[in-house]
Amino acid sequence: DWQGGVIENNYAKQGGAGILMQNWAEGTATGLIVCDNSADGYGGGLYTHVCVDVNFVDCQFYNNKSTSSGGAIYLSSSRSSFDPLSYMNFIGCDIYENQADNKGGGIYCAYQVISGWKDCKIRDNTAGQVGGGMYTLNGSITTLEDVRITGNQSGDQNGPQQIPTAETILQIGTQHQNEHDVADEVGVAAVSQNMAEETYPGQRIGQGGVVD
């Protein structure tokens, strides 16, 4: 487990310039700062693949860059039925001012990842395509509770084509600001402008920019 510390100014030719966790990894990081890392691939700050039980508590991810997806964080698991699902928890974390050339400026969740986000801030991140703050797809389940998602930007506000396998759940207290903040593979970039600063009690983002 990690207690404090700074992981900064690293480069990876593929993914996980700051942190690379895979092959049934588990553990907890508390008070860690991950910043100024750059990947020519997925996950400028953090890349995970098939992680059984990983927790980040009161951590900061900022100014990380990816030439692909997941500027700060890229979470993935295996498509194989022989491998376990990946379980990730982020509590009290601040993800800000990260950049991805493609999708998920702050966060990218894919491939059977079950992730929980509580009391986090996802702000001022940028994606070249969609999901300035967060992008989810392909069987991932993402639960947001008391999460502030604001000030994120993306190049395409319309979202990707419909692949109805992602599930994004907005729990009590979670707030969106604009259509660039969150994108998922059910074809929606987020809630519309006229729903800014609203809270959504345990509802799911649906197709067409509305809350189901």
Image (spheres, grey):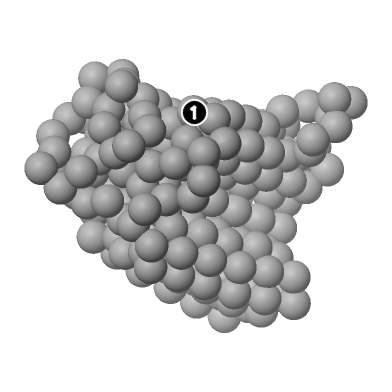
In this view, which residue lies farthest toward the right? 82
Q: Residue at x 68, y 38 (%)?
A: 111
Is disc 1 surrounded by few (<14), some (14 to 19) or many (20+) residues within 10 Å? Answer: many
Considering the numbered disc 1 on the image, is that residue within a helix, a strand or a loop?
strand
Against 200, residue 11 (above or below) is: below
Q: Residue at x 29, y 38 (%)?
A: 209
Against 7, residue 164 (above or below) is: above
Give coordinates of residue 184: x percent, y percent: 46, 42
Against 208, residue 211 (above or below) is: above
Position of the C terminus by quadrant: top left
Position of the N terminus by quadrant: top right
Q: Amino acid at mark 1?
A: Glu
Task: For residue 85, say whether it is visible.
Answer: yes
Task: For residue 95, say whether it is visible.
Answer: no
Is 32 displayed left or right of 195 in the figure? right
Is 12 displayed left or right of 140 in the figure? right
Give coordinates of residue 43: x percent, y percent: 61, 61
Q: Residue at x 85, y 32 (%)?
A: 80
Location of mark 1 (residue)? 167
Query: Total number of numbered labels?
Result: 1
Is 150 displayed left or right of 97 in the figure? left
Give coordinates of residue 16: x percent, y percent: 67, 63
Give coordinates of residue 58: x percent, y percent: 40, 47
Q: Quadrant of residue 41?
A: bottom right
Q: Residue at x 51, y 59 (%)?
A: 103
